[in-house]
Amino acid sequence: MFALKFGGTSVGSGEAILQVADIVIQRGFDKGAQPVVVTSAMAGATDRLLEALQSAFQGQKNKVKESIILLRRQHVEAIEKTLSVKYQEPVLAYLDEQIKYLENLLFAIHIIGEISPASHDAVCAIGEKLSSRILTAVLEERGYPAAHADLAEAVQTKEKEANGAFFEIARQQIGKLISVHLKNKKIVVATGFLGKIPGGILKSVGRGYSDFTTALIGAALKAREIQIWKEVDGILTADPRIVPNAKLLKDISYEAAAELAYFGAKVIHPKTIWPAIKFKIPVRILNTFKPKNPGTLMVEKIKDDVPVRTFSNKKGVTLINITSYRMLMAYGFLAKIFAIFEKYQASVDIVSTSEVSVSLTISDATNLKFILAELKELGTVEVRKDKAIICIVGHGMKNQPGIAGRIFSLLGKNKISVEVISQGASEINISCVINEKDMIKAIQLLHAEFVEK
């Protein structure tokens, strides 16, 4: 069994959905494997749903109506482009049913005057229900047995936190639901939305949660491979918008991919990694519009002596320095600092400590003024905005001394100031904080030094 996930651009039009159907048939069913397919909403559909949600909350009826008209038109065009009249009818009926459900949801939100995590999720999920239903019909019209699996009610648990225990239950329950269809020898087309999650799916998992759902399905059914189909060739040595001649990586370890995802790489959702690691399932990143390309394969371990393989970057970073002589020989001081960030749900990217100071970075400054007010009770606080993180990844770092020296000598020689340096215990990643205005130049210099040479 293969678990295949297609992103919003991959199902962004009628033509794109037909291409996806070709891939599903050729990659899975025609080779004797039963594919389970997960689709995101059509490109732009989630944005329209969120616009309608906000407009309903604000009582802007005309804007709600406009968003719904555009959403319906987008899907009608895709249905007419992909299906004959006979197969269009049930899908159009399903579309109208979902639009009516959406209108009722939005009306309730307007009356109550509140957007709960559950109602927010329910609105977002509609886009995936529609795209997956269209793809199911396309496969059926081509003569392939297919089942539409709406996972909105798949997870039933009394767990009150979206933690490891919750997602383990989710993995098992989703697996049981999909197994029923597989026993009937059908291609399963599922929604990326995996049911009610404590705190809401966007908060607990993030906008790219369809990747994570696919990984849970792959783990539950012991897939031969999890395939993430996007509009990119795979994982590159750098962001091609910064380094136009960035090279495709044929393989990468789970560990390195997780580092890249956490520090800004958009190719794969960070949470996708852990079900694959736990169940040792290979993950392949592929290009929907270039299906013959090999993509990038993620596995547990790779043979690699190259010191630096790839770079990731994150901008819009805030650097916070806390200095206090109360830290010296004191127990629990760091715990007090991180308790403040936990209180305001601010994720910390990088941490560096000395005997009397702590430097750390955050990417979301939503509650910054409240965080700073409490930190000032612990010591002197300095804030520096408009920073960027550069993440340098390579398995060969541990075997070749002097890599860090080469990195920072190169940056210093080119007058790029490094404010914080961090290296994890795995020794496959060196991260540093620099001025955001120097980020592009720094990555281009490092790529030329370590990859192009």
Image (spheres, helix red, strand yellow):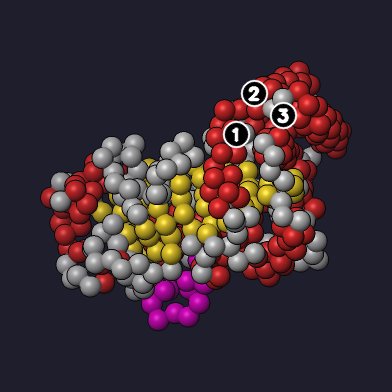
Find disc 3 in the rendering and name its residue: 52
The answer to whether residue 87 is magenta is no
Whole-angstrom CA distance, mark 1 to mark 3, is 25 Å
Mark 3 or mark 2: whose residue is earlier in sequence: 3
Is residue 449 at all visible to an observer of this figure?
yes
Q: Is residue 23 above or below residue 80?
A: below
* Residue at image coords 17%, 63%: 405
Q: Kindly identify the amino acid type of the residue bearing the numbered disc 2.
A: Lys
Amino acid on which disc 3 is placed:
Ala
Mark earlier in primary sequence (2, 1): 1
Q: Is residue 147 above or below residue 215?
A: above
Could you tell me which secondary element the residue under label 1 belongs to? Answer: helix
Q: Residue 17: give its label.
A: 1
Crowd class of label 2 (few under 14; some 14 to 19; many from 20; radius 10 Å): some
Label 2: element kind: helix
Residue 252 position, x and y percent, is 37, 60
Residue at left 49%, top 40%?
288
Residue at coordinates 68% horizontally, 64% vertically from top-left? 171
Viewer-side label of 1, 3: 1
Q: Which residue is mark 2?
A: 81
For label 3, the crowd category at 10 Å Cα-Cα, with few meaning under 14, some 14 to 19 and many 20 or more, is many
Check if mark 2's residue and mark 1's residue have beta carbons within 8 Å.
yes
Residue 289 percent across, percent down from the top left: 46, 36
Amino acid on which the number 1 mark rests in the picture: Ile
